[in-house]
Image: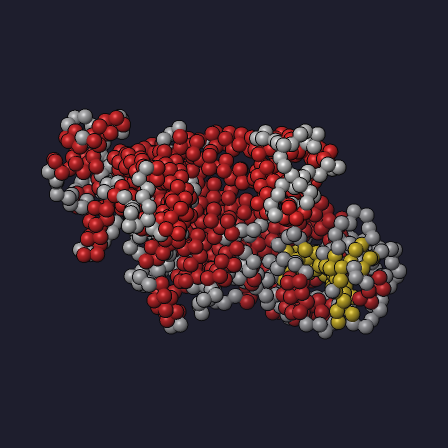
């Protein structure tokens, strides 16, 4: 195996070549070409026979080869086999491939593979092919030899011991064609048919070897030689109609003079001089179909082979015009294999075509077939690597659990419940170890679950396509799947998480672009739903979906970082409604504060509340398309009405805005108490202390710790609890809370002992700063301050980059400056101060000129005595290199104060302008987190929140009441809406959106 560099102008690539014996196994050669040379596996092989020697090729034959054969090879992904020599038909094919490569794009360039198979003894200057890489000079050949053509991708040079004799490669070529014809098409042989091999006769002599292996032939009538002889003989027989390129009928070739009757269907006559090169790919298709009819079974559809060829070549236009024009009744069994081929090899147009013409996806997609689709993932892809990671600790191979489910769990996090647990009846198992044991036992058995239908076929195929970043396929499955908004947000979430694991830049960029496309789709569909029916669009946002693991659109949108979706007015309207609870949204804040300190005012008209009965009547008064009476049977019985005193109390105190204001006020009191303890009432260690106020502070922090524990343990499902605990530290403010609590515990322990009392007080002082910084998160709800908080957070990242450059420059200057001023100073405290601290102060203008410039008087006593210096005395300055110190100081101030500081200002300006331009989107997105936090937490603020924790403990532990896992449990009258009606509105909106795009 070597490379050939042709010494020809305008030749910029090298060709592969292999010298082999005539009896070399063709399997080894085919594996070499596909696995090591990187040639794409063919969907068709066209072996051009004849036209050798120095005979002149006719003009219409050149046009057929250039506009017909090469074009058809590009559209079908075919290999073209010739002798690969610069003579006759081989030269014409090489020139056609060259012209196509010049005019075509880089994508189509890889689809046309020209392979030369010649006799080693016939190659001119073959002695130049002994080095690596070989430099081959194309010269005028002699009578018994010919040069290789530089337009071919690869050469197979067959050495049978002869020199100057043609036909030495004929036997190996026939064996290679026969071997390829028994290989499967598609990615890693995943296609539904064997690779079709067609021999194309252009004049020439050889026919017998390939006919013995039932190889179909396309004869170019009028090209000369054996081609004209066969066409004349077959056309004289009444039983041999000629094929027309227009596709009016299938032609069959009758027996020639020395052909047997069984070979009649293998030969097709093509009058290219009369018909032209147009629709040559259709001619190839009908030739192969006509030859395959004699091999087809009796029960098979007569058009089945033609359909499989059209799918293999990805020619949906041929399939629509010839096969799906309404004249053929397709059975499910006829489309099943082709559907699998189209899915595995990413041919979404055929998937859409099959779905529209009788293929029932409910019958097609079983759990077993879904697993086979995941097994067909190509090696080297990101999904393949993720599945391999999940496969390390399991004996099964790419099963729905734990491999596929584990990958989705990795990407989805705690947004939804695990996937495909219902397929193996694992939903009720609360221990992951027990679930793994149960799954392993089932997978070692009969695996009866694989015969069952997939519960949500379109959603499962959508996930499969999104995981492989197949844009067009995923978009089609999204169109077919229900719950369009949630499905689009789920695809956005999966793709953005996948992009974090992808290392290739182009693939990562395509994932992000597709994720943004799905977010735009979710935004547009929801916008149409919101304009159609506002109340039902709210239900769409908070309804738990069985398809997507019990999650909601709001939860999925937050997990997908869908800022554009959250900026929609409909989403913000629902969030505002949740935030204010049963109070009207135009209530002034001062009224809330006044009622907070005087609770009895909630029973007055100071605060306006909404009337739920009027809202229910408004919803019930709307006409029902499903008929009268049905809605009343479907709606659950309303809860018993509470007394006015209780209900009004709950309406005020259980609103998230009230909980927020209470927490803000109590947090300010907590900081005041903390500051009072540190500044005024911090007593010595026991038994003299701590003071009563400090004990109150301890209890207050204890209630804060209890609330943090409650936030982590809100989930009852074990897997979601583990995920919630693992993702708790991802949030920056959770890290801030955790840091504050840990510092407080350390300071509390240390202050109890005399030997660590001072250190404990220092830790508590630092901890007070951390608790105070926590106030920033509270004001994220403010429309003006919220975006500024985001700007500050992003600027902190810019500061870290700035500090890196500053640290490098500061250390470089500090070490050089210290060494030039003081020749010897062994004290480490002075070294660190003068190497790092003093240059840092130079940035702000604090420059000790007396110390830096020896021309100035310095009243500091110093010595040159090494012994005194080692004892701690101040060393004297070095005089002779002081001029260099001044120059370095000037350069240092120039770089730091002008270059680096202005760089930091420019970075801050860019960050500010970028965030400020989208400040409204950023604020609306982060507002959701705060609303969810205060909606799900108890209404009482620390330290009184301990009462709510005790009540919660009694409910869960003693009374064994189930927790409410729905973080956004909004008003019950929303949840009584008909899910089928909502799905109709959503699907109708999606269809209108797709039609307008």
| Residue 676: percent from left, percent from top | 32, 37
> Along the horizontal axis of the image, is 312 left or right of 397?
right
Q: What is the number of callouts on the image?
A: 0
Image quadrant in which you'd find residue 929: top left
| Residue 662: percent from left, percent from top | 26, 36
| Residue 304: percent from left, percent from top | 50, 59
| Residue 517: percent from left, percent from top | 47, 41
> Along the horizontal axis of the image, is 888 left or right of 686?
right
Q: Residue at x 49, y 58 (%)?
A: 386
Quarter of the picture containing the N terminus is bottom right
Furthest residue to the left? 643
Question: Can residue 580 be seen from the camera position used here?
Answer: yes
**In the depicted view, which residue is nearer to us: 699 or 627?**
699
Q: Residue at x 65, y 32 (%)?
A: 858
Q: Residue at x 74, y 52 (%)?
A: 13
Q: Residue at x 45, y 69 (%)?
A: 395
> Along the horizontal axis of the image, is 949 left or right of 158?
left
**In the depicted view, which residue is nearer to us: 872 or 384?**
872
């Amino acid at each position: 195996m070597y490379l050939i560099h042709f010494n020809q102008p305008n030749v910029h690539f090298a060709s592969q070549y292999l010298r082999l014996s005539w009896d070399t196994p063709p399997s080894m050669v085919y594996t070499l070409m596909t696995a090591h040379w990187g040639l794409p596996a063919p969907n068709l092989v066209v072996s051009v026979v004849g036209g050798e020697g120095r005979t002149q090729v006719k003009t219409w034959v050149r046009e057929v080869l250039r506009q017909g054969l090469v074009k058809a090879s590009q559209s079908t992904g075919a290999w073209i086999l010739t002798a690969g020599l610069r003579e006759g038909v081989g030269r014409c094919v090489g020139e056609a491939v060259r012209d196509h490569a010049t005019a075509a794009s880089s994508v189509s360039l890889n689809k046309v593979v020209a392979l030369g198979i010649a006799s080693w003894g016939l190659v001119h200057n073959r002695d130049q092919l002994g080095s690596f890489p070989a430099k081959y000079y194309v010269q005028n050949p002699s009578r018994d030899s010919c040069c290789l053509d530089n337009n071919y991708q690869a050469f197979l040079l067959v050495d049978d011991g002869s020199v100057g004799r043609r036909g030495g490669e004929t036997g190996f070529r026939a064996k290679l064609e026969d071997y390829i014809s028994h290989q499967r098409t598609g990615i890693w042989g995943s296609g539904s048919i064997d690779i079709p091999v067609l021999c194309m006769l252009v004049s020439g002599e050889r026919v017998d070897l390939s006919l013995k292996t039932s190889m179909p032939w396309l004869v170019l009538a009028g090209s000369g030689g054996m081609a004209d002889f066969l066409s004349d003989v077959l056309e004289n027989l009444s039983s041999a109609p000629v094929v027309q390129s227009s596709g009016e009928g299938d032609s069959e070739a009758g027996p020639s003079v020395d052909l047997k009757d069984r070979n009649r269907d293998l030969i097709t006559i093509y009058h290219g001089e009369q018909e032209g090169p147009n629709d040559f790919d259709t001619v190839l298709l009908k030739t192969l179909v006509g030859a395959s009819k004699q091999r087809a079974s009796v029960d098979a559809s007569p058009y089945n082979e033609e359909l499989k060829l059209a799918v293999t070549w990805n020619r949906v236009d041929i399939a629509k015009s010839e096969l799906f024009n309404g004249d053929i009744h397709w059975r499910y069994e006829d489309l099943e294999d082709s559907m699998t081929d189209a899915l595995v090899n990413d041919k979404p147009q055929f998937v859409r075509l099959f779905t529209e013409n009788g293929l029932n996806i409910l019958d097609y997609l079983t759990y077993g077939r879904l697993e086979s689709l995941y097994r067909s993932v190509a090696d080297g892809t990101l999904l393949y690597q993720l599945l391999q990671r999940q496969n390390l600790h399991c004996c099964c191979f790419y099963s729905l659990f734990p491999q596929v489910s584990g990958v989705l769990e990795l990407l989805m996090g705690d947004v939804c419940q695990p996937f495909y647990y219902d397929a193996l009846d694992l939903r009720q198992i609360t221990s992951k170890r027990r679930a793994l044991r149960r799954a392993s036992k089932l997978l070692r058995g009969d695996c009866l679950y694989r015969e069952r239908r997939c519960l949500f076929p379109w959603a499962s195929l959508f996930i499969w396509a999104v995981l492989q970043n197949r844009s067009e396929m995923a978009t089609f499955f999204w169109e077919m799947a229900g719950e369009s908004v949630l499905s689009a947000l789920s695809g956005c979430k999966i793709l953005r998480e996948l992009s974090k694991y992808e290392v290739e830049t182009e693939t990562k960029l395509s994932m992000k672009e597709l994720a943004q496309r799905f977010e735009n789709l979710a935004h547009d569909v929801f916008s149409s739903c919101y304009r159609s029916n506002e109340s039902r669009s709210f239900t769409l946002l908070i309804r738990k979906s069985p398809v997507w693991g019990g999650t909601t659109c709001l939860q999925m949108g937050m997990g997908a970082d869908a800022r554009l979706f959250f900026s929609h007015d409909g989403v913000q309207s629902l969030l505002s409604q949740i935030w204010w609870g049963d109070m009207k949204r135009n209530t002034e804040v001062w009224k809330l504060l006044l009622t907070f300190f005087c609770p009895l005012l909630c029973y007055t008209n100071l605060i306006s509340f909404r009337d739920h009965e009027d809202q229910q009547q408004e919803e019930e008064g709307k006409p029902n398309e499903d008929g009268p009476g049905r809605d009343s049977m479907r709606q659950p019985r309303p809860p018993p009405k509470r007394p006015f005193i209780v209900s009004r109390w709950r309406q005020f105190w259980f609103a998230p805005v009230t909980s927020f204001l209470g927490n803000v006020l109590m947090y300010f009191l907590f900081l005041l108490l903390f500051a009072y303890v540190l500044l005024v009432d911090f007593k010595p260690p026991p038994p003299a202390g701590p003071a009563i106020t400090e004990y109150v502070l301890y209890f207050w922090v204890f209630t804060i710790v209890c609330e943090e524990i409650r936030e982590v343990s809100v989930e009852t499902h074990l897997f979601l609890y583990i995920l919630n605990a693992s993702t708790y530290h991802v949030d920056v403010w959770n890290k801030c809370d955790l840091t504050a609590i840990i510092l407080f515990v350390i300071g509390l322990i240390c202050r109890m002992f005399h030997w660590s009392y001072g250190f404990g007080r220092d830790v508590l002082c630092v901890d007070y700063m951390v608790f105070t910084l926590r106030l920033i998160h509270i004001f994220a709800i403010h429309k003006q301050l919220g975006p500024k908080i985001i700007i500050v957070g992003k600027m902190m990242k810019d500061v870290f980059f700035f500090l890196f450059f500053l640290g490098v420059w500061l250390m470089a200057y500090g070490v050089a400056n210290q060494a030039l001023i003081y020749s010897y100073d062994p004290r480490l405290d002075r070294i660190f101060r003068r190497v790092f601290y003093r240059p840092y102060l130079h940035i702000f203008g604090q420059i000790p000129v007396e110390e830096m410039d020896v021309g100035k008087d310095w009243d500091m006593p110093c010595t040159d005595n090494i012994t005194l210096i080692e004892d701690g005395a101040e060393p004297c300055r070095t005089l002779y290199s002081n001029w260099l110190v001044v120059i370095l100081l000037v350069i240092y101030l120039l770089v730091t104060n002008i270059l680096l500081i202005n760089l930091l200002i420019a970075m801050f300006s860019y960050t500010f302008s970028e965030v400020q331009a989208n400040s409204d989107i950023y604020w609306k997105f982060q507002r959701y987190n705060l609303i969810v936090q205060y909606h799900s937490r108890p209404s009482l603020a620390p330290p009184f929140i301990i009462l709510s924790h005790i009540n919660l403990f009694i409910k869960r532990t003693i009374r064994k009441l189930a927790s409410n896992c729905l973080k956004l449990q909004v008003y019950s009258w929303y949840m009584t809406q008909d899910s089928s009606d909502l799905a109709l509105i959503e699907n109708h909106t999606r269809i209108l959106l797709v039609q307008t795009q």
